[in-house]
Image (spheres, grey):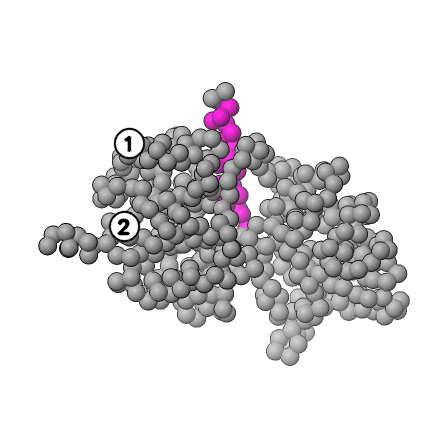
C-alpha cells in the first residue's frame, strides 16, 4: 500500500528551464552552460537552475525545454532535452534547500563514472571555485536546438500569441523571477499536452543533435575578437566598412558573393559605394544595381509618421526611399535592380518587416549565410579570421549578450585551469 502511494507522488513532468538569470551571473559562470554543450565523449547532460535540483514529484521528468526571457509573458525557445535519466539521488532532491551540502560525494562519483568532462576537465573541477555541489541533474539521450528558420515562442497570455510562431501555454503565469516551471500530466494537463505536442512537432527543431563540443582549438581560440576589445562588436558601420573593403579590393570575393549569396548572375565587376545617398552598400555595373541595407541592432530608419496609411500601403521609411531612388537610377540607364537587407539571425523575423512600404522588394539575407560564405574564402585575405569571429556573433539564432559571455567564461575557465595543470 505504501509503495503504491509513493509511486503516485511521481508525475510525468515537463520542465521549462529559463537560462541565465540573476545577479549570480555578474561574475560567475552559470552552471546551466552545460545544457548547450556536449561532453568530451559526445553526451548531453542537463543542469536545472537554481542549485541543480528539482522537486521530488518530478522524478519522472520527460523533457526539459530551455528558454530565454523576452518579456513577462513571453519566452523564446532555445532547445529541449529528452529521454532523461535522473543523476541526483532522491536524498538530494529532498534536501534541495540545503545549498552547498547536497549529495556531494554521489555527484562526484557519477561524474567520474560517466566521464562528464568538457575540454578535458571534469565538470566539478571547472566549477570548483563556485558555491555549489550539484553539477548535473539529468543525463539527456536526446537534445535538439530550435530550427533557426522557425523560431518559436511560448506565451502565458492568449492575446500575446501574435501568429503561429507563438504558442499559448494554458495554466501558467510566467515570472521574471522564476527559473523553472513544472507542467504535470496530472494537474497541469493542458499545459503538459501543449508542450508535449510542441516537442513532437519536427518542423520546430533541427534535424540532428546540434549542441556543441569543446575542442582543444576552441578552448584556445573562442570567437572573442578585436571588435569585442574595442566595444564595436555590434556596430553595423564597422561591418559595412569591412564588407566594402573586401568587395572592392578582392574581385573574386565580390563575384562569388554576388553570385552565390545574392544569386545574381553576372561576370562583370561591380563598383562598390558606401553611404551612397545614405545606402549602406551600393553595387553597380552596366547591367545591375544592388542596394544593401545592413542592420545589426538598429531599427528601420526614416519612418514618416505623418505620411502613411498602414492598412493601405505601409509605413514609408528608408526602405521605400532607397527603392524609389534606385528605380529612378535604373530606369535612366536601363539596368536591373536588386534589394537586400542583411540581418543577424537573432534579429527581425521576416514578417516583422511587412509593415514597411516596399518591403516585398527586399530579400532578407541572414548573417549565418554571410558567415558561411566568408568561411569559404581564402585565409590569405587580411584580417579575415577576425572578420569571421565577428560574423559568427551575428549568426547566432539569438542575441548572445549573456549567452556569449557565459560561453567565453566557460571556455576561458577551462583554458586557465589546464594551464595551471601543465
Q: Is residue 375 magenta?
A: no
Image location of residue 91, percent across then percent down: 22, 41
Q: Residue at x 83, y 62 (%)?
A: 288
Q: Residue at x 73, y 44 (%)?
A: 377
* Residue 18 placement, left or right of 281: left
Could you tell me which secondary element the residue under label 2 belongs to? Answer: loop
Give the CA separation, mark 1 to mark 2: 20 Å
Image location of residue 307, percent across then percent down: 68, 74
* Residue 418 placement, left or right of 286: left
* Quadrant assignment, res 137: top left
Image location of residue 57, percent across then percent down: 24, 52
* Mark before the other along the chain sequence, 1 or 2: 2
Image location of residue 379, percent across then percent down: 72, 38
Report the disc number at residue 105. Answer: 1
Q: What segment is highlighted magenta in the picture?
A: 399-420
Q: Is residue 416 magenta?
A: yes
Q: Residue at x 26, y 57 (%)?
A: 11
* Residue 319 placement, left or right of 266: left
Could you tell me which secondary element the residue under label 1 belongs to? Answer: helix
* Residue 24 placement, left or right of 11: right
Q: Is residue 13 above or below residue 30?
A: below
Q: Nearer the viewer, residue 17 or 352?
A: 17
Q: Is residue 142 above or below residue 231?
A: below
Report the disc number at residue 59. Answer: 2
Q: Is residue 71 visible?
A: no
Q: Is residue 395 above or below residue 149?
A: above
Question: Magenta span: helix, strand or loop, mainly?
Answer: helix
Q: Residue at x 29, y 59 (%)?
A: 184
Q: Is residue 12 visible?
A: yes
Amino acid at each position: 500500500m505504501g509503495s503504491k502511494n509513493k509511486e503516485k507522488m511521481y508525475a510525468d513532468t515537463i520542465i521549462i528551464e529559463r537560462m541565465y538569470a540573476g545577479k549570480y551571473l555578474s561574475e560567475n559562470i552559470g552552471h546551466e552552460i552545460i545544457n548547450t554543450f556536449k561532453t568530451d565523449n559526445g553526451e548531453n547532460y542537463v543542469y536545472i537552475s537554481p542549485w541543480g535540483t528539482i522537486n521530488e514529484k518530478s522524478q519522472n521528468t520527460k523533457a526539459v525545454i530551455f528558454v530565454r526571457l523576452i518579456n513577462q509573458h513571453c519566452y523564446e525557445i532555445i532547445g529541449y532535452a529528452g529521454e532523461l535519466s535522473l543523476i541526483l539521488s532522491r536524498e538530494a532532491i529532498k534536501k534541495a534547500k540545503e545549498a552547498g551540502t547536497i549529495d556531494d560525494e554521489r555527484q562526484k562519483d557519477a561524474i567520474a563514472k560517466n566521464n562528464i568532462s568538457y575540454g578535458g576537465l571534469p565538470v566539478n573541477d571547472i566549477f570548483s571555485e563556485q558555491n555549489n555541489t550539484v553539477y548535473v541533474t539529468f543525463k539527456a539521450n536526446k537534445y535538439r536546438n530550435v530550427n533557426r528558420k522557425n523560431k518559436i515562442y511560448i506565451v502565458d497570455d492568449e492575446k500575446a500569441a501574435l501568429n503561429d510562431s507563438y504558442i499559448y501555454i494554458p495554466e501558467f503565469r510566467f515570472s521574471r523571477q522564476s527559473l523553472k516551471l513544472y507542467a504535470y500530466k496530472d494537474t497541469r494537463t493542458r499545459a503538459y499536452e501543449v508542450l508535449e505536442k510542441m516537442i513532437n512537432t519536427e518542423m520546430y527543431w533541427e534535424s540532428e543533435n546540434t549542441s556543441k563540443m569543446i575542442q582543444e582549438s576552441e578552448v584556445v581560440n573562442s570567437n572573442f575578437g578585436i571588435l569585442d576589445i574595442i566595444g564595436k562588436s555590434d556596430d553595423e558601420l564597422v561591418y559595412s566598412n569591412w564588407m566594402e573593403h573586401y568587395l572592392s579590393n578582392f574581385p573574386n570575393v565580390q563575384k562569388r558573393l554576388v553570385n552565390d549569396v545574392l544569386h545574381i548572375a553576372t561576370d562583370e565587376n561591380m563598383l562598390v559605394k558606401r553611404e551612397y545617398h545614405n545606402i549602406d552598400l551600393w553595387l553597380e555595373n552596366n547591367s545591375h544595381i544592388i542596394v544593401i541595407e545592413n542592420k545589426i541592432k538598429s531599427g528601420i530608419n526614416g519612418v514618416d509618421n505623418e505620411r502613411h496609411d498602414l492598412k493601405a500601403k505601409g509605413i514609408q521609411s528608408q526602405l521605400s526611399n532607397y527603392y524609389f531612388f534606385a528605380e529612378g537610377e535604373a530606369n535612366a540607364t536601363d539596368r536591373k535592380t536588386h534589394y537586400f537587407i542583411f540581418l543577424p539571425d537573432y534579429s527581425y523575423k521576416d514578417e516583422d518587416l511587412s509593415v514597411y512600404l516596399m518591403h516585398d522588394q527586399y530579400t532578407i539575407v541572414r548573417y549565418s549565410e554571410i558567415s558561411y560564405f566568408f568561411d569559404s574564402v581564402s585565409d590569405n585575405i587580411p584580417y579575415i579570421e577576425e572578420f569571421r569571429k565577428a560574423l559568427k556573433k551575428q549568426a547566432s539564432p539569438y542575441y548572445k549578450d549573456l549567452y556569449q559571455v557565459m560561453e567565453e567564461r566557460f571556455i576561458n575557465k577551462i583554458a586557465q585551469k589546464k594551464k595551471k595543470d601543465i
